[in-house]
Image (cartoon, grey):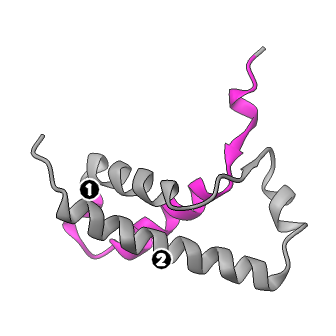
Amino acid sequence: MSINNHIRNYYEQLVAEEILRTLSDQDKINNVDYLADVACVALNRLPARYIRFEVDMAFYMTPDELAQNNEAVQKAVKQAISFVDSHHRDT
């Protein structure tokens, strides 16, 4: 039995949604490698928060904590985009 399919990092979905929102009007949105690089950099800037179910976090978070998490995600994605753009690699 593997537990890999039963746990995930709370921030993964939030980061993915923020990347797509931030880059929605840019051509980079179609570059899966670029998006993955941005996601990895952003996730490494956030604390690890592993959950089994979304309700695990939502139920225990205050509105202030939720706002702080959203701000942290926005900041991490913005910094990650800047980092990846400045460290472009040819593939």
Quick one: label 1, few (<14), some, or many (20+) residues within 10 Å? few
The question of residue 40 being in magenta is answered with no
First in sequence: mark 1 vs mark 2: 1
Distance from disc 1 to disc 2, alpha carbons, whole Å, reads 22 Å
- Amino acid beneath label 2: Lys
- Amino acid beneath label 1: Asn
Report the residue marked by disc 2: 75
Front residue of 23/10: it is 10
Q: Residue at x 34, y 50 (%)?
A: 37
Q: Secondary structure at mark 2?
A: helix
Q: Residue at x 86, y 56 (%)?
A: 56
Front residue of 6/49: it is 49
Front residue of 22/44: it is 44
Magenta-tinted stretch: 2-30
Q: Is residue 74 left or right of residue 79?
A: right
With respect to residue 69, does 3 lie above or below? above
